[in-house]
RNA sequence: CGGGGUGUAGCGCAGCCCGGUUAGCGCACCUGGUUUGGGACCAGGGGGUCGCAGGUUCGAAUCCUGCCACCCCGACCA
């Protein structure tokens, strides 16, 4: 965008909004708290969906679809769950409109009040477990390994494109198992799938960990998560995987006969990632010139921009460009030849940089003469002039390099923003200064966590899996602690 | 729901304090021409219920009252 990434928090927000709009990803809708995902933005989401969906299927899951509406009574069956979501539910109370008697347009027909209100799903555990009750009788019916791609509604007070909108798109997996071990293994497996996707496709490094009781999903026994660090120093929860224990089985009476012929409650998991990942992608890799997309998720891998004066030149360039496009497409790459004569080359360069296209190939009269092209990579902005026939090997190699470089760059940034602190003073100083993840000892109590949150706005993002054990004292209470946990201010 | 801010052409804004021709600028758009290796230039042109409603006034984008919408910061959350 030609505008430096701001360091002040408010400015970063505005910069982010502008980028989302200018890169043609999404825009605010006139509908309260909602967002319109534009075709270019959606095509990135589709790439994410495709990759994730394949990973789910490779781990034995299948897709299904459950209702958008949840009868109010379902939601209240699991006590913690309803408490966690009650404050942000959209509720359907009527099913009909009518013309106003005073001619003031259309009004809700009071006659058409629903017997039982319907909740627009904020998540689907309740509808799904009420369905699973009918699906499970015997251990032979287990496990159920189902995923659904859906939209959900959470009536958040304050919204932010991709990170928190009233309606958003996501994927939610809901599985049912005969044993605790199997369910825990599933929970951990899906966390690994998420980490794998986010790191290898999105090129965003994450910390895998488990949430504290305070931050746990409403109704879960354990919530595992992946936490990423954004370039403004704030943390973003990129995905969660919950071990539900037998909580939902109990609430919805989902029992099965085990091999010994005894009735037992089913063990459950649920896991999800959302269009929030788009926000993570944007806030991890973007630079002063706009979006930077990792090749594995870029809707367009290579854009070819012709530079010409005369029609004959355009003809000759077109031939070359089409040949390149054909050859690279055959390798499975998505190539766009922007042959519009309504925009000048410089304009196109800026445009595709803004949209994050990983590789740009420019062909002009000079190249026609020399049999060369100019290849520019988006991540480093480096340009090189190469022979035409080198492209078939150079492009795949470059795309791989960009993918790796983006990950390494983000990881280096994150490492620099991980700080071990041993006093509360230092803790606050780091939060207000360089930001990022702060590793500190914590006494393990909710009270301490709450107080720290209240005083500093920092929360415990997670307790990392395979965390190093280390004797120490809580930075807040001074009580003994056996390990450091990850604190940060978060989105 | 609290605090701050903004609503004027598709986008970004000036004008408002101190009321007064026909409401202006940049980008974008249309026409013609010259251009094309990093967001071209010249000339001409089109596009406005000044967020909405009411009030004050001979006269309101400008002053007053009420309402609405959006943005940013908090509380809530993925």
Image (tube, coloured by chain):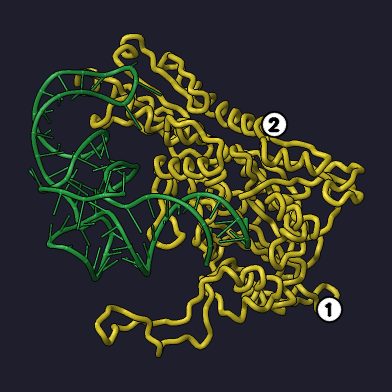
> What chain does mark 2 sit on?
A
Badge number at residue A416: 2
Q: Position of residue A118 (x, y in %)?
A: 52, 78
Q: Residue at (24%, 29%) from the top-left corner?
A: A341
Which numbered disc flags the more N-terminal residue, 2 or 1?
1
Q: Which chain is yellow?
A: A
Q: Relative to A353, say whether A184 is above or below.
A: below
Is residue A305 visible in the rendered image? The answer is: yes
Q: Quadrant of residue A467?
A: top right
Q: Position of residue A318 (x, y in %)?
A: 28, 24
Q: Relative to A370, say whether A434 is above or below.
A: below
Q: Foreground residue, A219 or A395?
A: A219
Task: Specify whether disc 2 shares its chain with disc 1.
Answer: yes
Q: Position of residue A368 (x, y in %)?
A: 31, 13
In the picture of the structure, the residue carrying the numbered disc 1 is A262
Q: Which chain is green?
A: B
Dot 1: what SS? loop
Q: Quadrant of residue A317?
A: top left
Q: Mark 2, residues whose alpha carbon is within 10 Å: few (<14), some, or many (≥20)?
A: few
Q: Quadrant of residue A261?
A: bottom right
Q: Position of residue A271 (x, y in %)?
A: 65, 58
Is residue A36 visible in the rendered image? The answer is: no
> What chain does mark 1 sit on?
A
Q: Foreground residue, A218 or A427?
A: A427
Q: Mark 1, residues whose alpha carbon is within 10 Å: few (<14), some, or many (≥20)?
A: few
Distance in Å between CA atoms under marks 2 and 1: 55 Å
Q: Residue at (61%, 53%) from the top-left corner?
A: A57
Q: Foreground residue, A7 or A245?
A: A7
């Amino acid at each position: 965008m030609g505008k430096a990434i701001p360091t002040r928090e408010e400015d970063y927000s505005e910069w982010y909004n502008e980028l989302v709009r200018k890169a043609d990803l999404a825009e605010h809708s006139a509908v309260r708290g909602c967002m319109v995902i534009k075709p270019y933005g959606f095509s990135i989401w589709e790439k994410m969906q495709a990759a994730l969906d394949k990973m789910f299927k490779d781990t034995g899951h299948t897709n299904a679809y459950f209702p958008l509406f949840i009868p109010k009574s379902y939601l209240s069956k699991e006590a913690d769950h309803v408490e966690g979501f009650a404050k942000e539910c959209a509720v359907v109370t009527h099913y009909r409109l009518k013309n106003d008697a005073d001619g003031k347009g259309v009004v809700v027909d009071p006659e058409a009040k629903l017997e039982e209100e319907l909740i627009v799903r904020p998540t689907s555990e309740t509808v799904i477990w009420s369905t699973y009750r009918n699906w499970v009788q015997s251990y032979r019916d287990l496990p159920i390994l189902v995923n659904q791609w859906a939209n959900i509604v959470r009536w958040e007070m304050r919204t932010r494109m991709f990170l928190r909108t009233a309606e958003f798109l996501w994927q939610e997996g809901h599985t049912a198992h005969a044993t605790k071990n199997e369910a825990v293994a599933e929970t951990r497996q899906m966390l690994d799938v998420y980490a794998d996707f986010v790191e290898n496709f999105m090129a965003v490094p994450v910390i895998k960990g488990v949430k504290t009781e305070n931050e746990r999903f409403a109704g879960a026994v354990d919530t595992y998560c992946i936490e990423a660090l954004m370039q403004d120093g704030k943390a973003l929860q990129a995905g969660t995987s919950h071990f539900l224990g037998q909580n939902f089985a109990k609430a919805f009476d989902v029992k099965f006969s085990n091999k010994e012929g005894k009735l037992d409650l089913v063990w459950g998991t649920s896991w999800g990632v959302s269009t929030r990942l788009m926000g993570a992608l944007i806030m991890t890799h973007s630079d002063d010139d706009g979006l930077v997309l990792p090749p594995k998720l870029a809707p367009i891998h290579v854009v070819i921009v012709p530079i010409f004066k005369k029609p004959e030149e355009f003809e000759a360039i077109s031939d070359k460009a089409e040949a390149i496009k054909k050859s690279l497409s055959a390798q499975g790459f998505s190539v766009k030849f922007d042959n519009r004569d309504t925009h000048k080359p410089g304009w196109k360069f800026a445009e595709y940089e803004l949209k994050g296209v990983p590789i740009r190939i420019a062909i002009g009269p000079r190249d026609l003469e020399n049999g060369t092209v100019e290849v520019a990579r988006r991540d480093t902005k480096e340009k090189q002039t190469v022979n035409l026939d080198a492209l078939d090997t150079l492009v795949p190699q470059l795309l791989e390099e960009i993918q790796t470089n983006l990950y390494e760059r983000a990881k280096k940034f994150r490492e620099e923003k991980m700080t071990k602190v041993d006093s509360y003073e230092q803790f606050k100083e780091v939060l207000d200064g360089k930001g990022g993840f702060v590793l500190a000892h914590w006494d393990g109590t909710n009270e301490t966590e709450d107080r720290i949150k209240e005083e500093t706005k920092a929360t415990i993002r997670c307790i990392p899996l395979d965390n190093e054990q280390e004797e120490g004292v809580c930075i807040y209470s001074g009580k003994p602690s056996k390990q450091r946990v990850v604190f940060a201010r978060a989105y």
